[in-house]
């Protein structure tokens, strides 16, 4: 945590210096970078508090993250009166039960509760509303929103319940590792893209993402992830491979959810986090990277 704070101090000082260089505050790029740095301060403060308070506090915080992310997803996805029952269950039953299962370390049910039982229950509840207009489309949106914002994101704090060889009780470090690699990859892709970006990665999906940003930012995140092997059960080579999996999954998650936003005619999922849009804008990479990292770690190191 001390190293993270030191990096943020350096980033804040650089941002302040760049903003003083020109009459326009350094331009949109510098202002965006400073906004991202301020948002990082807030996120690191929240994560630090959760780690200090223990696993229960961490689960509660991630449950709220899932709640706000699902709210943003549903807000951009128009619903009808017939959807009220499944939505109420999604917010007030599925979220607390999913995170309770993690807290109880009940892996067998945690892994299938939403993909099996919730997947079947949500359309069954929607049927009771009696509204068949666009039924498939409406139900699919709710199911997909729950999968991304609740099931996938919940795999991040679920790292704390893993019982690994020679690494028992250190799951919080794996959660820290995941969040660091994902977020550093996002930030460094932005920086490398602004400095060296020439070739658009997916111009119709995310115009700001470039091939140079993905490669440069991804390699930087992999390098940092490899250097942090000592807080994980991995060797340096294994840490490099795990970081690579996290970076690739996170990049794909960002692109997929950007495509969803574009299809809904929105630039951001919300405006909850200054400089970052909504909660889901910040967690889009995590939603894809967390389950991949969780199951790779559990399969190979349990």
Image (spheres, grey):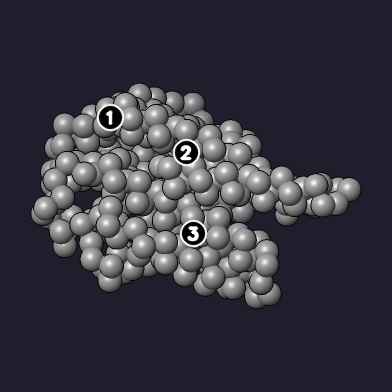
Q: Residue at x 66, y 72 (%)?
A: 196
Displayed quadrant of residue 145: top left
Q: Residue at x 28, y 49 (%)?
A: 174
Mark 1 vs mark 2, CA separation in Å: 15 Å
* Residue located farthest toward the right when viewing the structure as drawn: 23
Q: Residue at x 77, y 47 (%)?
A: 19
Tag 3–tag 1 contact (CB < 8 Å): no
Tag 3: Cα neighbours inside 10 Å, few (<14), some, or many (≥20)? many
Residue at numbered disc 2: 44
Residue at numbered disc 1: 54
> Which corner quadrant holds the C terminus?
bottom left
Tag 2–tag 3 contact (CB < 8 Å): no
Q: Is residue 206 above or below residue 76?
A: below
Disc nearer the start of the sequence (3/1): 1
Disc nearer the start of the sequence (2/3): 2
Q: Position of residue 65 (x, y in %)?
A: 43, 34
Mark 2 vs mark 3, CA separation in Å: 16 Å
Residue at numbered disc 3: 185
Using the rendered image of the protein, determine whether residue 16 is visible from the camera's viewpoint: yes
Q: Position of residue 115 (x, y in %)?
A: 26, 46
Q: Position of residue 168 (x, y in %)?
A: 14, 45
Q: Is residue 12 above or below residue 70?
A: below
Tag 2: Cα neighbours inside 10 Å, few (<14), some, or many (≥20)? some
Tag 1: Cα neighbours inside 10 Å, few (<14), some, or many (≥20)? few
Disc nearer the start of the sequence (1/2): 2
């Amino acid at each position: 945590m001390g190293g993270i704070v030191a990096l943020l101090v350096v980033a804040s000082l650089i941002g302040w210096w760049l903003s003083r260089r020109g009459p326009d505050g350094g331009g949109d790029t510098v202002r965006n970078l400073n906004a991202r740095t301020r948002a990082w301060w807030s996120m690191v403060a929240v994560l630090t508090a959760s780690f200090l308070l223990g696993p229960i506090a961490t689960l509660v915080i991630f449950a709220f993250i899932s709640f706000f992310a699902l709210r943003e997803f549903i807000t951009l996805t128009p619903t009808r009166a017939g959807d009220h029952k499944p939505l109420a269950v999604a917010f007030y039953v599925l979220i607390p039960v999913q995170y309770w299962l993690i807290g109880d370390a009940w892996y067998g049910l945690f892994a299938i509760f939403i993909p099996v039982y919730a997947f079947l229950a949500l359309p069954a509840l929607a049927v009771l509303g009696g509204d068949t207009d666009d039924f498939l489309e409406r139900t699919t949106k709710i199911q997909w929103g729950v999968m991304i914002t609740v099931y996938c994101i919940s795999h991040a704090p679920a790292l704390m319940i893993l019982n690994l060889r020679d690494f028992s009780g250190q799951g919080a470090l794996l959660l820290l590792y995941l969040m660091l690699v994902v977020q550093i990859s996002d930030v460094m892709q932005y920086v490398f893209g602004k400095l060296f970006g020439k070739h658009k990665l997916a111009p119709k999906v995310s115009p700001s993402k470039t091939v140079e940003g993905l490669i440069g930012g991804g390699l930087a995140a992999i390098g940092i992830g490899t250097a942090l092997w000592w807080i994980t059960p991995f060797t340096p080579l294994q840490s490099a491979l795990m970081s690579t999996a996290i970076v690739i999954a996170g990049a794909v998650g960002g692109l997929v959810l950007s495509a969803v936003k574009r299809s809904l005619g929105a630039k951001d999922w919300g405006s909850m986090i200054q400089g970052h849009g909504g909660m889901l804008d910040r967690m889009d990479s995590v939603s894809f990277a967390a389950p991949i990292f969780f199951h790779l770690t559990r399969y190979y190191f349990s």
